Image: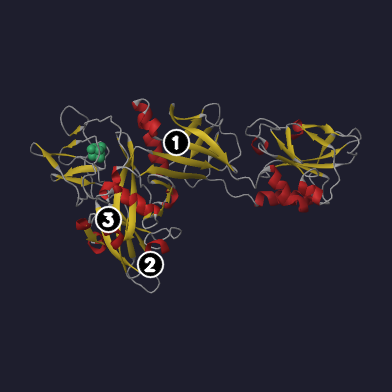
Amino acid sequence: MSEHSTEHTRVDHGSDNVDPGVPLTAGPTVLPNSVPERVGSSKVVCNACPVLCHISPGRTGACDRWGNVDGALTRIDSLVLTARHLPGVEAPTLFVTGVGSGTTYPDYKPAPFIVASRHDEVDMVTVVTEGIFSYCSIKVKIDTDRFLGPEQGNVRHQGEIVGHVTTAEYGSQMLSIGGVHHLTGGSKKEGRLTCSVMADLGNKQPVELTIDGGSNLVVQAGTAPIVNGVAERRMRVGCGSATIGIFAQQWLGLVDEVVVVDDHITGVLSEHQAGRCLDMRPSGIALRGRRSTAGRYFKVANPGAGWGGTDIVDPLSIIDGFDPDLAWPGLTLLMVSTTGEHAAYFILDAALRPQPAPLPARVQEVVERIVENCEPALSTVLFVGGAGGSLRAGVTLSPVRLTRSIKDALVNVTCGGAPAYVWPGGGITVMVDVARMPDNSFGTVPTPAIVAPIEFTMRRSDYTALGGHVDSIVALEQVAARSAKRIVPHAPSNPWPLDGKALLG
Ligand code: SF4
């Protein structure tokens, strides 16, 4: 478990002078590792996070995740199991996820579920918990070339800074949201809003963000980003130079010159290596911006929401002119953006000035092929969490052995059954695509911190060797027999968490 914020807020739910918690609804679940501490006659103290809520009977604590059910500290949401059907086997195979499992906090005790199962004739163990993460962030990949804001620009939600614009990737703008600095290093409001934005993004909900000096956005995992009120439709086929390379052959003989407008690398066909290889006649076009290499220009305009992620409205504004020794009247020129969203056709007049002309059908076909080759624009949300802290004590008496076993590929780490990438180097920094996790996998606690499911699966022999809590192991059948559970289909694109050569050798 990550280190928690030191800002503890003791909440006395159900007493006369504080905001009462939420009345309990149906489906509460008492978990085996919950250790309620009675206060007076009827309240229980929740010790699942540092807030230590005092909860009256029939109420929940500040996070609505734990409640007092008949005097027992109870995790309110159902435990989520994923199920897959194997050919020829009637009963589904089940995997116990951390969603709704409860937490090990304050980490002196074993994880809520340590589940024994058999897989391919091998005895396996899965340690299941909900980690409380103060060290965590969300990376949002937004497939658009439109200018969202300057790199390092502040990203805000309801006026509070919750993240920043980070390095753009190929065809996508990237945001970094949350992190310990925003959760714990600013005002209470900043921490609270950061936490809620992260949980909403993790739970695949739409979130409105504004970027200083940039755009307003609505992002939601797995859906098209909305930039300044307009839903983005297409991710560019490539940068301007790549687009030239891809379509050069198809333009040959149809048009004398093509300029692919792109905020990063604008391409000029006849000058580009692709045009040269096709023996294209130089057009003598002179572009604004900085020539990087033949037919590849940087900074032809400013970033914006116009052609190819620039602020260009009139494409001719980036042309400085034509060399009279090379250009000729009647020369045909196509200007197009990297998504094919913008295209215009020109013919040079006697004074070598481009005059607009209708796009010929065969040139139009190639523009449409650019459109066809664009992928749908999506927002992708990745959760990054540091599981290298005290959370490990819920798995083993010797936490560094868990870290080493993960690095040695003896342990498979999943989040809600979805594969987690474990960053190389020290610690256990995991990264997971929230779209592959069950819905509503994330919660929050008011410290503030994010609650996220995590599972560690390994051979039982390896679990014993790393000093695991073997006395707390329960059979999968025992967990599956619980009444308060929710079984969801295992996402077919997710590997089965118990599979893998690394685990089964
Ligand atoms: S905020 Fe939630 S997890 Fe924390 S003590 Fe209160 S009820 Fe328990």
Q: Amino acid at mark 1?
A: Ile
- Quadrant location of the C terminus in the rendered image: bottom left
Disc 3: which residue: 485
Does the CB distance between marks 3 and 2 fall below 8 Å?
no
Of helix, strand and loop, which one carries label 2? loop
The residues bearing labels 3 and 2 have C-alpha atoms spaced at a distance of 18 Å
Q: Which residue is labeled 1 in the image?
A: 177
**Label 3 amino acid?**
Lys
Quarter holding the N terminus? top left
Q: Which residue is mark 2?
A: 85
Q: Earlier in the sequence, mark 1 or mark 2?
A: 2
Task: For ligand 1, tell me if the residue under mark 3 lies within 8 Å.
Answer: no
How far apart, in angstroms, are the residues tagged by discs 1 and 2? 37 Å
On the question of residue 313 being in view, the answer is yes
Q: Is residue 482 visible?
A: no
Q: Residue at x 42, y 43 (%)?
A: 384
**Few, some or many residues within 10 Å of mark 2 (<14, 14–19, 20+):** few
Cα separation, mark 3 vs mark 1, equals 32 Å
Q: Are marks 3 and 1 in contact (CB under 8 Å)?
A: no
Which amino acid lies under the numbered mark 2 shown in the image of this protein?
His
Q: Nearer the viewer, mark 3 or mark 1?
A: 1
Residue 26 numbered tag: none
Does any atom of ligand 1 lie closer than 8 Å to the CB of label 1?
Answer: no
Q: Is residue 119 left or right of residue 140?
A: left
- Quadrant in which residue 120 is drawn: bottom left
Q: Residue at x 81, y 41 (%)?
A: 333
**In the rendering, at what x and y percent does residue 72 appear?**
15, 46
